[in-house]
Image (cartoon, rainbow, N blue to C red):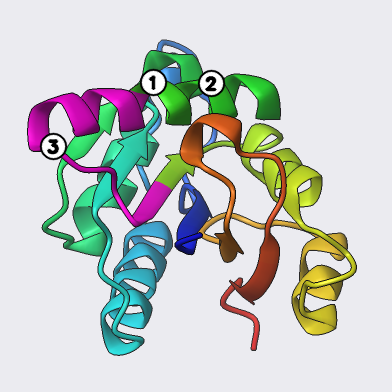
Amino acid sequence: MPVRTLLLLRHAEAVAIAPGRSDADRPLTAAGRTRATEVGEVLRSSGTTVDLVLCSPALRTRETVEALQLTAPLVLASAIYNAGSDTIVAAITEAVAEHRAVHGHEPTTLLVVGHAPGVPALAHDLADPATSSLAALNAIERGYPPATLCRLDTEDPWDALDSGRLVAVDNGRS
């Protein structure tokens, strides 16, 4: 079975909710832009090639993706906004099926850019404690701050995603 890589990224730091601005329209702070750029550099320096990005349509997630400076196709999925882990998995299945129909193959590495609590919940739900890195498990147990990126490797088909080996977590704190 081929190994697939799922990258889960919580959007970078955004401005607080303010009167007259909807939650979906909150932009990144300057620090959030800087951190998102750093995450993009981490991905490139590790040699990770992202094949498909699945992103919430909220402004802060789109700005996070822009700051990553990736060349992968981007799919905006409204289902990811305020979604739980099951909804995110369903959005992954749908995006992969669409990618396969258009490109003739499935992505090997997929990046999901979303929100708390859905993205952290999915990381917890998928991480197999028996095969995952103890340091990575401990990192997500301590929290999942903005711009946290985790990597899960799985042999599950995208349409039957159930578990994976949590390999690494980058939360900008190390």
Q: Which residue lies furthest to the front in this view?
A: 1
Relative height, residue 151 to residue 86 (above, below): below
Compute the Cα span from label 1 to label 2.
Answer: 6 Å
Q: Residue 94, labelled with which disc? A: 1
- Indicate the position of residue 79 as horizontal and vertical percent values: 47, 15
Label 1 is placed on what type of residue?
Glu
**Mark nearer the viewer, 1 or 3:** 3
Say if residue 140 shows up in the picture.
yes
The residue positioned 81% from the left and 59% from the top of the image is 128
Asked whether the beta carbons under mark 1 and mark 2 sit within 8 Å of each other, the answer is yes
Instruction: Look at 18% across and 60% down and name the residue there.
Output: 70
Disc 1 from disc 3: Cα separation = 15 Å
- The C terminus appears in which quarter of the rendering? bottom right
Residue 82 percent location from the top left of the image: 59, 20
Instruction: Measuring from the top left, give residue 77's x and y in whole percent.
Output: 36, 21
Instruction: Residue 15: tell me if it is visible.
Output: no
Say which quarter of the image contains residue 22: top left
**Element carrying mark 1:** helix
- Is 68 inside the magenta-drawn segment? no
Inspect the image, locate mark 2, and give the three-letter code of the amino acid beneath it. Ala
Alpha carbons under labels 2 and 3: distance apart: 20 Å
Classed neighbour count for the residue bearing mark 1: other residues with Cα under 10 Å, few (<14), some (14–19), many (≥20): some
For mark 3, does the 10 Å Cα neighbourhood hold few (<14), some (14 to 19), or many (20 or more) residues? few
Identify the residue position indicated by label 3 in the image: 104
Residue at horizontal 17 percent and vertical 25 percent from the top: 101
Reading the image, the residue beneath label 2 is 90
Q: How many labels, in total?
A: 3
Ranked by sequence position, the earlier of labels 1 and 3 is 1
Per the rendered image, the range of residues in magenta is 95-111
Given contact means CB atoms under 8 Å apart, are the residues at marks 1 and 3 in contact? no
Q: Which amino acid does label 3 sit on?
A: Gly
User: Which residue is at the front of the view, 75 or 153?
Assistant: 153
